[in-house]
Amino acid sequence: FSNHFAEKLYRLGRLQYEPQAFGGRIKVFRRISDGALTVFSEGGIRFSPDGEVDGTNGVFNPNAWESVFEQNKKTVRGNPIPGSGRASHEVIEIAAEEWALVLSAGDAILNIHIPADGKMDYTLCLESFSKALEFFPMYRPDVQFKGFACHSWLLDPDLGRLLPADSNIVRFQREFYLYPVLGDDSQMFERVFGGKPADLSGAPGETLLQRVIINHLAGGGRMRTGAGFMLPSL
């Protein structure tokens, strides 16, 4: 592992890890009694009616709504993100004494990068997660982290619906708690098609992933980057 010490990115098997401050605009609470999670959006974020961050792919919705978040000694109140990758317009309230804040913006995390030099093999990803949980406490105990975070086209929640449940991408997604971020489809086009085609009808459809995305876009759907976190200690 000696090569890692002069680097900012740590390659551990299939994935890379970068110690960072968490940038997600969310508040993650764990119920003290059983470990269940409730995730709130920060306040003041505009969401489209479907729960995406308004402005995703450069599209602004006139019916966008703004999130709220309030916390005091008795209650925590705000717009939840139920793990589907989209925010809910419904405001909920939880009892502050029953829940602990376990992740918010600025907390130390390991940001996951996915090198483009190999297959997106789910088993290799699991092995990499395990290596990270062993490597940092042993070789970099100075690097404290609450969990993992990832920001990638692979975490687009629509892929979880469009692809088979046993596909590597869907299984990788399910390791994370998804939440919406402002983004676009540029990373997806670059990784899947080598760039954005001028005409969808001329886009390559050699793989299932390519065909699924082409059909989705042709039917009026959109793709975007997504984000997620994992808290392995919980």
Image (spheres, rainbow, N blue to C red):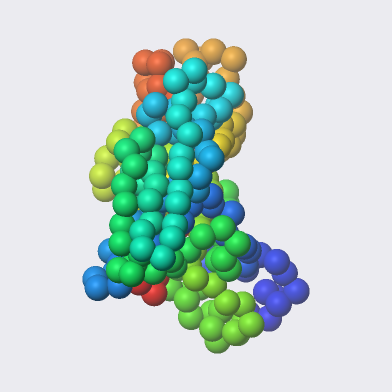
Q: Quadrant of residue 19?
A: bottom right
Residue 4 lies, with reference to residue 61, above or below; the image says below
Quick one: quadrant of the N terminus?
A: bottom right
Image coords of residue 185 (percent x, y): 54, 30
Q: How many marks?
A: 0
Image coords of residue 186 (percent x, y): 59, 31
Residue 16 lies, with reference to residue 93, above or below; the image says below
Q: Quadrant of residue 197?
A: top right
Image coords of residue 201 (percent x, y): 47, 13
Residue 10 lies, with reference to residue 83, above or below; the image says below
Residue at position x 59%, y 54% in the image = 23
Query: Is residue 199 at all visible to an observer of this figure?
Result: yes
Residue at position x 40%, y 47% in the image = 78
Image coords of residue 153 (percent x, y): 50, 41
Front-most of residues 216 and 143: 143
Residue at position x 61%, y 28% in the image = 195
Is 137 displayed left or right of 157 in the figure? right
Front-most of residues 108 and 1: 108
Is 234 displayed left or right of 188 in the figure? left
Residue at position x 31%, y 33% in the image = 162
Quick one: quadrant of the C terminus?
A: bottom left
Is 217 displayed left or right of 194 in the figure? left
Query: Is residue 192 at all visible to an observer of this figure?
Result: no
Front-most of residues 70 and 192: 70
